[in-house]
Amino acid sequence: MMKKLIFFGLLIVLAVLWWLPVKFPFDLKPLPDKSFGKTLSKKDDAFSNVLSESDKGFARALKPRKFSFPLDHGAHDQYRTEWWYFTGNLSSAEGRRFGYELTFFRFALSPDALVSKSAWRSNQVYMAHLTLTDAEKDRFYTDERFSRAANGLAGASDKQYRVWLYDWSASARDGPDFPLRLSAKSDEFAIDFMLTPMKGPIFQGEHGLSRKSDEPGNASYYYSYTRLATEGSVRIGDTLFSVIGNSWMDREWSTSSLSKEQAGWDWFALQLSDGSELMFYQLRRKDGRVDRNSSGSIVLADNVKVPLTAQDAAIEVLATWTSPHSKIRYPSLWRLSVPGQRLELDVVPLINDQELNVSVRYWEGAVSVKGTKNGRPVSGQGYVELTGY
């Protein structure tokens, strides 16, 4: 969903990367958190103007637009932020359950193309997050990478679905988009999947315009593939698991952030056993209230979208979990109700500890779902993202 706050927390980091004139080594990894603080303290004054003026000159999501593929699978450099977001729930033949996230982010440090004699400078910076949840072993693996979009180190194509950062990639196998191959590896774990859509794209919000607050232009262009048949392999250490399951893909690009009254969000992407899917993000205000711009949709089995407003859904937190890493307390059990659809779901994480301890901490994890729909039992799986806690 909306990972803009993650980007804003990394603005100075990315600005530093933009100005560095040297080539990144292929296996560059982020500095530890403490090193970030030491490095950035020397750069704060130099980049304060970048932070305060960064919205000027960028395009904004103001009204619905016509989408075109594969063009819109590619980058939209005139907007400040963008992401290609994949999550999924998988299992081995023996029933071992896994969850994964692979997300690519693009961040523009200026609205105009950079003119430089150095081939290693670019005003477009990419970041990627990779996670794997191993429910049986109660383990959560994470990794992240950064690169400027220069000399082929990172980027996104508008000719064919392909986004990459070093050797992490989502790329079309044949034709303009699907099936897609996801491939990414870390020292401890790796994923290699083929994704095939079982439904067409869903344009979230108002024909793809997803409003985040009442302020004009405080919105994103947002489309999803809500059910992607997935097969491939997961590697943990030296052990390889063949897996199958379903994935979800979100695409968003925008310029503006949340409003100053908004603290964060709880975002749900759930795939149900009756062939439908539910996406809902609840925006939380700093005064503790639910923001009226909270929104989502139900996608029926025949791919018909049913829009949801803040008044259409209710989320009740039934339990919490405190991270041993950050001491942050997160929700860990939810009851999500959509009375108009006679839908009531209990959502529980596969494991509680799915907090990303990367440059900016947030919780994003695989979940299981049980409940009722129209008075009948329904089950499912999905992903939940929590920010601002």
Image: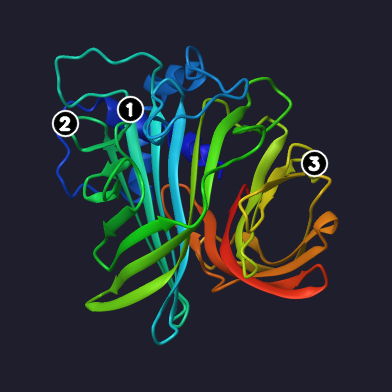
In the rendered structure, the answer to whether residue 286 lies left or right of residue 131 reads: right
For residue 33, say whether it is visible: yes
Q: Amino acid at mark 2?
A: Asn
Q: Amino acid at mark 3?
A: Asp
The outermost residue toward the bottom is: 94
In the rendered structure, the answer to whether residue 285 lies left or right of residue 270 reads: right
**Residue denoted by label 3:** 287
Q: As rendered, which of 349 and 275 lies closer to the eye?
A: 275
Callout 2 secondary element = loop
The crowding category of the residue bearing disc 2, from other C-alpha atoms within 10 Å (few below 14, some 14 to 19, many at least 20), is few
- Quadrant where the N terminus lies? top right
Q: As rendered, which of 314 and 274 lies closer to the eye?
A: 274
Q: Nearer the N terminus, badge 1 or badge 3?
A: 1
Q: Estimate the spatial distance between the alpha carbons at disc 1 and disc 3, rounded to whole Å.
A: 35 Å
**Residue denoted by label 1:** 124
Q: Amino acid at mark 1?
A: Gln
Callout 3 secondary element = loop
Which residue is at a point 68% across and 46% down the rendered structure image? Answer: 296
* Residue 48 placement (x, y as % from top left): 45, 21
* Residue 73 placement (x, y as % from top left): 40, 36
The image quadrant that residue 139 belongs to is bottom left
- Identify whether 137 is placed above or below 18: below
Q: Nearer the N terminus, badge 2 or badge 3?
A: 2
Callout 1 secondary element = strand
Verify CB contact (< 8 Å) between mark 2 and mark 3: no
**Residue denoted by label 2:** 151
